[in-house]
């Protein structure tokens, strides 16, 4: 039986041959069978990947919808009370790990007040939005603080440029100057942060999924590591890496839509 298992996993072949065989199959998302469940690895991953992607996108939407407006508000009200309060909140957000905020949200809003379910992912779009609200907020908290700080710095830098003075001299309203000129020119670093945040959120959903007992790839990774299920861990690692690469590619393509200089091959100094 030992010999049969070694032959099945090509452990009786040289190392480079083993890697070549694995790479050939991995290119087709064939990672073999799980040692723990004996099911195809990709079958188990694909059944859980949708939930993790939904949670990551959900957390990214929360991050952008809250982090960017707060960053703009802090930049416009620079050195005032609003700015100081927002910056203080961002420091708290950066300093709070996702698993700690997740447990706190779970106790406060699910157990104490009963506003949200304690566990489960729900069914349908509306059901998932409701069931994953607390995990998404817990996952987005740190990312939201980072996007907020970066947005604030980018908008402050844009407001100090000469074209902003010229736009105001033309008699444009402050809202038009802020949206059409300052925020649009500050969008590149914001999009960069949002793309990096999405990849990090998908990869960092492990602790949140475990805290909320969600059947995603994060909890599957923990279970596989505990069971020493090497094929499953390999498949999950490659899958998460591919998702992050795709997110970074989409972020680069977004640059072309936001910055015409890149479409014409003109780079910023």
Image (tube, rainbow, N blue to C red):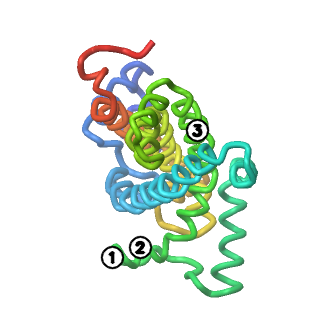
Is 47 drawn above or below residue 42 in the view shown? below
Disc 2 is placed on an element classified as helix
Residue at (56, 44) in percent of width and height: 147
Q: Quadrant of residue 61?
A: bottom left
Q: Which mark is residue 150?
A: 3
Residue at (56, 66) in percent of width and height: 135
Local crowd size for mark 3, using a 10 Å CA cut-off: few (<14), some (14–19), many (≥20)? many
Is 143 drawn above or below residue 260 in the view shown? below
Q: For this rendering, which residue is in front, 225 or 95?
A: 95
Q: Which mark is residue 124?
A: 1
Q: Is residue 73 visible?
A: yes
- Confirm or deny contact between disc 1 and disc 2 (CB under 8 A): yes
| Residue occupied by mark 2 | 128
Q: CA distance from mark 1 to mark 2?
A: 6 Å
In the rendered structure, which disc, 3 or 1, sits on the residue that comes first in sequence? 1
Q: CA distance from mark 3 to mark 2?
A: 30 Å
Using residue 244 as the reference point, say whether residue 86 is left or right of it. Answer: right
Position of residue 85 measured from the top left corner of the image (x, y, whole percent) = 74, 55
Position of residue 107 measured from the top left corner of the image (x, y, whole percent) = 71, 77
Residue depth check, mark 3 versus mark 2: number of the one nearer the observer: 3
Local crowd size for mark 1, using a 10 Å CA cut-off: few (<14), some (14–19), many (≥20)? few
Using residue 233 as the reference point, say whether residue 43 is left or right of it. Answer: left
Is 140 drawn above or below residue 115 in the view shown? above
- Say which quadrant the C terminus sits in: top left
């Amino acid at each position: 039986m030992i010999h049969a298992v070694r032959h099945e996993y090509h452990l009786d072949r040289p190392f480079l041959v083993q890697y070549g065989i694995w790479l050939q199959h991995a290119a087709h998302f064939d990672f073999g069978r799980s040692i723990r469940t004996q099911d195809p690895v990709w079958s188990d991953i694909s059944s859980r990947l949708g939930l993790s992607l939904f949670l990551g996108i959900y957390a990214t939407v929360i991050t952008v919808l809250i982090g960017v407006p707060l960053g703009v508000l802090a930049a416009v009200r620079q050195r005032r009370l609003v700015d100081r309060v927002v910056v203080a909140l961002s420091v708290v957000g950066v300093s709070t790990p996702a698993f700690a905020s997740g447990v706190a949200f779970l106790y406060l809003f699910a157990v104490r007040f009963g506003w949200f379910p304690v566990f489960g992912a729900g069914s349908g779009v509306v059901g998932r939005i409701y069931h994953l609200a607390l995990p998404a907020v817990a996952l987005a908290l740190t990312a939201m603080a980072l996007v907020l700080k970066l947005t604030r710095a980018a908008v402050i830098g844009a407001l100090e440029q000469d074209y902003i003075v010229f736009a105001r001299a033309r008699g444009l309203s402050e809202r038009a100057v802020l949206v059409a000129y300052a925020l649009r020119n500050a969008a590149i670093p914001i999009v960069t942060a949002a793309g990096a945040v999405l990849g990090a959120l998908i990869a960092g959903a492990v602790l949140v999924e475990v805290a909320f007992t969600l059947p995603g790839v994060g909890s599957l990774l923990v279970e596989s590591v505990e069971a020493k299920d090497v094929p499953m861990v390999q498949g999950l690692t490659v899958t998460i890496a591919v998702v992050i690469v795709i997110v970074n590619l989409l972020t680069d393509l977004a640059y072309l839509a936001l910055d015409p200089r890149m479409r014409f091959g003109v780079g910023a100094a």
